[in-house]
Amino acid sequence: MTRPAPLTLAAGLTITLALALTGCSPEPSASSGGTPELKVSGAYMPRPVSDLAAGFIVVTNSGGAADKLTSVTSDISDDITIHQTENQKMRQVASFDIPAGGELNLERGGSHIMFANLKQRPEQDQKVKIELHFEKAGPIKVELPVKETTYNPAQH
Ligand code: CU
């Protein structure tokens, strides 16, 4: 006849309550729709032929709040501004609106990112790294592939 030995589980066992995992993502309050959700596509830079360059992107906002593109930074230039084109004249603006559920479309002949005093002139097929800064959303890093000087995706 064997009798099961009494089990002393409690001896020295530390119960680690690892359940309380902190530091998760910010509260997913998508239902309230209070934040912009930004995505960048269609980025390119026509190969510059002087120390001026233009950059084009599309920023899509699938969130429930509008945002604004307020500035752009890059190692390639310390003089980057955002421009509107009216009557074939460029004009610097303080920001571009990105409506909730809408998009900001920078395209040739229209609004663009303007790079002045280029530190180096990128060649075709190189990539220019930029960072977009917004009023509400965090900054987004984008690579602009350098296309031929006359490149325009809107023309086919
Ligand atoms: Cu311009």
Image (tube, grey):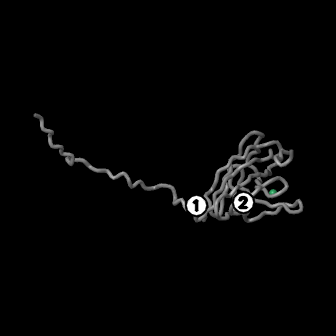
Q: Residue furthest right?
A: 87
| Quarter of the rendering containing residue 2 | top left
Q: Can see residue 152?
A: yes
Q: Count of labels shown?
A: 2
Q: Disc 1 marks which amino acid?
A: Ala
Q: Is mark 2 within 8 Å of ligand 1?
A: no
- Callout 2: few (<14), some (14-19), or many (20+) C-alpha neighbours within 10 Å? some
Which quadrant would the C terminus be assigned to in this image?
Answer: top right
Q: Residue furthest top?
A: 1
Badge 1 marks a residue whose secondary structure is loop
Q: Can see residue 70?
A: no
Q: Which residue is mark 2?
A: 102
Residue in the foreground of this view, choosing between 146 and 16: 16
x%, y% of residue 41? 71, 49
Q: Which residue is mark 1?
A: 30
Side of 106 where 31 appears, left or right: left
Badge 2 marks a residue whose secondary structure is loop
